[in-house]
Each structure stands twice: as C-alpha cells, then as structure tokens.
Image (cartoon, rainbow, N blue to C red):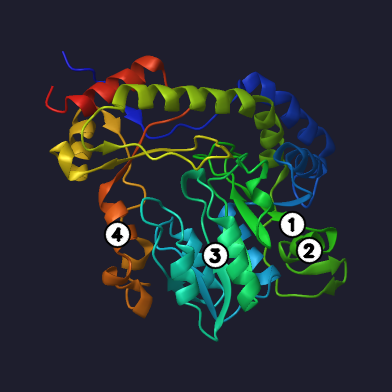
Amino acid sequence: MANTEQIYVTQPLLPPLEEFLPYLEKIWDNKWLTNGGPFHQQLERELAIHLGVEHLSLFANGTLALVTALQALRITGEVITTPYSFVATAHSLLWNGIKPVFVDVTPGGFNLDPAQVEAAITPQTTAILPVHVYGHPCNVDALQKIADTYGLKVLYDAAHAFGVHYQGKSLLRHGDLSVLSFHATKVFNTFEGGAIVCPDEKTKKRIDDLKNFGFADEVTVTAPGINAKMNEVQAAFGLLQLRHVGNALERRREIDGLYRHLLKDVPGIFLPMAPDDTVWNHAYFPILVKPEYGLSRDALNDALRKNGIFARRYFYPLISEFPMYRGLPTAARSRLPVAWQASQEVLCLPIYPALTDEHVQRIALLIREPGA
C-alpha cells in the first residue's frame, strides 16, 4: 500500500509552546505591544551578537525591510538585480519608483554574474541588488569592486542567508546594507519578520526613523517613512527561537548530508553546493533535473506529488516573466539564458528540522525510482 503521509517542502520551526508562555505573560504584565518594547530591544542586541554584526534593525517583514533599505540608501534611477529570486526583490524597487535592470546569473550557479552586472551599467545606474540565493554567497569581492569603480551602492537581499559565514566572517557584513527575512518558512523565523543589518549607529538611526513613519522624536517627522515595526510577540518568539536555532541548523546539515549520500550517483540529478570557505545554513536543498535523468523536472515534480511529496520549483518562473516586468528591455528570455535554464531544471526538496531520516529515504527512493 502506498504511503499516504504528505510531506511539504518546509515546515516552520516551532519550539515547545510551554516555553513561549512566560514571554507572553511578560507582555501581558507590562502591556507594551509594539513601538520598540523590551523584547524588541533585546532581540536586536542578541541577534547582532549571534550573527556577528555591529547593528541590526528589526522589521515586521522582509519586504518592508527591503523597501526601507532602498529609502535609507536614497536609491533612485536604475538598479541592477537578478531575475532568479522571489518577487519581493524586484517589487521593492517598483514600490520605490526604481527601474529594475535584470542581468543573468553565473553559469553553474544561481547568483548575479559580475561580468553581466558591469556590462549593464548606464549613467542612470545607482545600485546593485544581488541575492544570496539558497544562502550561497554571491561573488561579493567582484561585486564590491564594480560598485567602487562606478560609485554604486550595494544592497544585498540576504533573505536566505541567516547565519551564513563566508571567508571567516558573517556574509551579512558585505555591501552597504543586508536585508534578512524571518518569514515562517525561513531557517530562523518570527512568524513574519525581517531585519536590516547596518554598518554604523547613524545608519541604524535613519532606518529606525524610517520604519516608524519618519519620526525623529515625538514632534519631528524628517522623512516619509512607513509603519514597519516588529511587534513584541514576534520579538519574543524570536528570542525563544534563538535558543533552538543551533540544533535546527545541525539537523538541516544532517538532512543535507543524507540526501547527498542517497542521490549522489543518480544520472541527471545535479546537487549544487555552496562555495568553499562557507559555513552554510542548509536553508534549502535544490536539485537540478538534467535531460540525462529521463524525466523532465515537471514530470518528476508530478510523480513526487502523486506520492504525497510536495517539493517546489523555486524559482520558477523568473521574476522577469511576470506581467509587471516582462515588458522591460532587460526581461527578454534571450538575455537571461542561464537563469532561464535553471528555472526549468530546479526543484527544491523538503528540508526542515522535523523531517526524519525515513522521510528523506522515501523521497530519495522516489527520485531514484520514480515509477516505483
């Protein structure tokens, strides 16, 4: 009899409920629900220490953090970015009246190709918005060199990069700002949530003002800010999450290793890895389904679903193929062949701390023998 248990691509990390209750009791006692309460302040401090960064500003979600980061850097005109990401990356540009300029990703990888970035620069270019896709570090040195040469800002969408270290330091230290997501599907979550990693106290103050309607003090508004503050319930949950995230990351590493062992010799199944010198968070487990496999990516996805395994074609389609972007000159598929090919082959398999070895073995067997 077929196994009818359904397994989804991700499942949120939820520590024991009884451990959360004392935090809620404190919120009920002090009746401070938002506007930079004690849990909010504590989480900013503890996250900065945990992540190895100097300053960090919490947000209600990662998209608002992206929108605000662009405001904080005073970005205008054109911004070079990737078509191979979640739509929030490009949407944040549109919300700021900025024109996205899409360029291709590196051959054999998923991140922005520095050579393509440099070739796309025009007098209207003001910044580069790369994404550390799946937590794999971008070529940060090459991108920074380009930015320095042409006087551009670099804002990293680091939604996937919680806890990632590259070349011995936090990946979040690169660029002018880095933006994190703490959405329920992420390695570290606060239900919804996000943060901007800041290089100095002055920048953090501007960001803190912008996320609170632009208020500099009780009676002074200095910018057209937005309401993007993280509330106390989210912040309290984040503090609890920090107590468990180390074990969660270790379990993800184990699952990643088991997948690689079980799938290493399957013809046509390519298993991407993070670059060397990376302490990776194993946020996702993408595979690329090549023609040698015998089934298309979509056919394999359908076969898995028929057996209760809900993987995800992440990222498909490209951002550049959605209606609000496909009219842009840089959105043409012919200009983005590497990203387009990846979008046709990628399939992210389930990975989350509660996934058992038996689940992984079941998924791997279905990939090895899709007709079984």
Looking at the rendered image, the disc whose residue lies closer to the viewer, 2 or 3, is 3
Query: What amino acid is at disc 4?
Result: Trp
Q: Nearer the viewer, mark 4 or mark 2?
A: 4
* First in sequence: mark 3 vs mark 4: 3
Q: Position of residue 302 (x, y in %)?
A: 19, 38
Q: Quick one: quadrant of the C terminus? A: top left
Which image quarter: residue 41? top right
Residue 340 locus on image (x, y percent): 29, 59
Labels 1 and 2 touching (C-beta < 8 A): yes
Whole-number angstrom distance, CA of label 1 to CA of label 4: 33 Å
Name the N-terminal-most of marks 1 and 2. Answer: 1
| Residue picked out by circle 4 | 340
Residue beneath label 2, please?
Answer: 203
Q: Residues within 10 Å of mark 2 (few under 14, many from 20)?
A: some
Which type of secondary structure does the marked residue at label 4 adopt? helix
Does dot 2 land on a helix, a strand or a loop?
A: helix
First along the sequence among labels 2 and 3:
3
Residue depicted at 35% across the width and 36% down the height: 271
Q: Do the residues under discs 4 and 2 have CB atoms within 8 angstroms?
A: no
Distance of mark 1 from mark 3, alpha carbons? Answer: 16 Å
Q: Where residue 368 appears, x then y in whole percent?
A: 21, 26
Q: CA distance from mark 3 to mark 4?
A: 19 Å
Q: Is residue 224 above or below residue 42?
A: below
* Residue of label 3: 129
Position of residue 207 relative to residue 233, above or below, is below
Q: Mark 1 or mark 4: which comes first in sequence? A: 1
**Quadrant the N terminus occupies:** top left
- What residue is disc 1 on? 198
Q: Position of residue 117 (x, y in %)?
A: 48, 70
Q: Toward which corner of the image does residue 263 lie, by quadrant? A: top left
Asked where in the image residue 219 lies, by quadrant, the reply is bottom right
- Evaluate whether residue 20 shows in this view: yes
